[in-house]
Image (cartoon, helix red, strand yellow):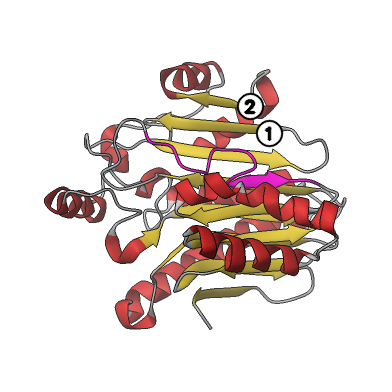
Amino acid sequence: MYTLAIHGGAGTITKSSMSPEKELLYKAALNDALKVGESILKNGGSSLDAVVAAVVFLEDCPLFNAGRGAVFTADGVNELDASVMRGDNLMAGAVAGVKNIRNPVKLARAIMEHSEHVLLAGKGASDFARTQSIAFESDEYFHTDFRLKQLEEARLEGGTFLDHTEKKFGTVGAVALDKHGNLAACTSTGGMTNKRFGRVGDSPVIGAGTYANNQTAAISCTGHGEFFLRGVVAYDVSCLMEYAGLSLQQACEKVILEKQVKLGGEGGLIAVDAKGNISLVFNSEGMYRGKLAEGSESVVEIYKE
């Protein structure tokens, strides 16, 4: 049995604010990302390979705030974060504040598999990427008119915004259970529009934005990173399952619909447990999300039901 879930960000996403054409584009991209991951899982591939492949697809898609579609910082550049974790041995890798890396999630995996570290940042992370033949791209590769317009609007308003337009929290992520019973999770983001001072959110922080443990679940978060960091959200879900005996759905709802709401953290998460159950929970108006399980049709949704 295998299961897979993905997300492309959460926030104030309503049907009235979405054109039919753009909705179709988002749903098509989410469906394609699911297909990429499932093609690995159904052939007996690992959950790690599946989640990384799904996120690479989303990083390459300019619709999402990760990789090619990343937002601009106050300096007019793209600073990228990502993390990955496997549930069988709790190995993890993460990267923060890198520039020109085509697929930050691939770099996060390389850090996990080919270094003695978990989290690398900035220039050092880029130096390591070169030793691993990680692909780099020019500034122009990451330039989209849509993101530039967001930056210009943010500068006029004098603020820092989570993907700015319609308060969308632009992060992508994937979680999976493979046929061998192993869980994995990964997350990738471009962070906040007009961010300064090397700001880093929860996405590259193991336990906050990403976590996986075969004894509990694999979790990937999307939301207001500062609050998800304070709440150690991904690990909190796992802890509630391991120590309090909560089910996956109970744990996710308690963290996102109770604890994060009280704290002020808007956003959501996707999670898969060791039994193949899937949970997609958010406290915002919407979350780009998709899921599938072996033997069933994939489901892609955007708005709050």
> In the rendered image, is residue 50 in sight?
no
Residue furthest toward the front? 262
What residue is at 80 percent from the left and 66 percent from the top? 247
| Magenta span contains residue 207 | yes
Query: What's the magenta bit mostly, secondary-structure-wise?
Result: loop
* Alpha carbon separation for disc pair 2 and 1: 6 Å
Which of the image's four quarters has the N terminus?
bottom right
The amino acid marked with disc number 2 is Val
Find numbered disc 2 in the image and state the secondary structure of the residue it sits on.
loop
Mark identifier at residue 118: 2
The amino acid marked with disc number 1 is Ala
On the rendered structure, is 273 left or right of 259? right
Which residues lie in the magenta part?
A: 199-213
| Magenta span contains residue 72 | no
Q: Which numbered disc flags the more N-terminal residue, 2 or 1?
A: 1
> In the rendered image, is residue 296 in sight?
yes
What residue is at 31 percent from the left and 40 percent from the top? 141
What residue is at 65 percent from the left and 50 percent from the top? 234
Residue furthest toward the left? 156
Q: Position of residue 65 (x, y in %)?
A: 39, 51
Above or below, 230 against 257 in this view is: above
Q: Position of residue 63 (x, y in %)?
A: 38, 58
Above or below, 268 against 133 in this view is: below
User: According to the image, label 1 marks what residue?
Assistant: 92
